[in-house]
Image (cartoon, rainbow, N blue to C red):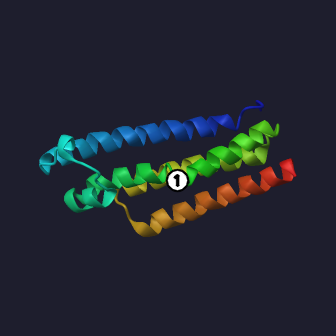
Amino acid sequence: MAKTALLQPIVTLIAWTLVMLGWMLITRLPALRKAGISMGSLVGSKAADADRSLPAAAQWKAHNYNHLMEQPTLFYAICGALVLAGAGNHVGSVALAWGYTLIRIAHSLVQATVNKVKPRFILFLLSSACLIGLTLIAMMQIF
């Protein structure tokens, strides 16, 4: 296994985040137009404003994109720490990192399509468990 195997799930999740950005834009921009909202006239608006004005399904992609800017930042940091510590090819951490990435992609697909809370919550818990595992491995490698 390459010394940088842990970078593959990182790059994959970043690429997926960009896919969600594109999906959000191609869904949300037409919804804004249909709602008669001109981005040129918006000043200091908040996400809650869009939630009140746009169909929920159009907002789900935006909400998920925001979620991909939250907890995954910890994932990127802990994986980076493992790579810097020379543990970028540790079999357990690579498996957990791929697990995290694939579960977050599944979470995105659920949230962006049917947006059922129970499966989203289960996927969130599973991805969090992977993140906890990665953190424990990093602690053992670094301390």
Seen at 63% across and 49% down, the residue is: 75
Q: How many numbered circles does the render carry?
A: 1
| Amino acid residing under circle 1 | Glu
Q: Position of residue 10 (x, y in %)?
A: 61, 39
The picture places residue 82, in percent across and down from the top left corner, at: 76, 43
Q: What residue do we see at 58% from left, 47% from top?
A: 101
The local crowd at label 1, few if under 14, some if 14 to 19, many if 20 or more residues have their Cα within 10 Å, is few
- Which quadrant would the N terminus be assigned to in this image? top right
- Is any part of residue 110 visible from this angle? yes
In the figure, is residue 25 to the left or right of 17? left
Relative to 123, does residue 88 appear above or below in the rendering?
Answer: above
Relative side of 67 to 74, left or right: left
Mark 1, secondary structure of its residue: loop
Quadrant housing residue 21: top left
Image point (26%, 56%), residue name: 50
Q: Which quarter of the picture shows residue 22? A: top left
Q: Is residue 77 left or right of residue 64?
A: right
The residue positioned 23% from the left and 62% from the top of the image is 52
Q: Can residue 88 be seen from the camera position used here?
A: no
Image: 39 above or below 133: above
Position of 113 compared to 86: left or right?
A: left
- Give the percent coordinates (x, y) of residue 120: 46, 63
- Seen from this angle, which residue lies furthest front? 43
Judging by the rendered image, the residue that carries numbered circle 1 is 70
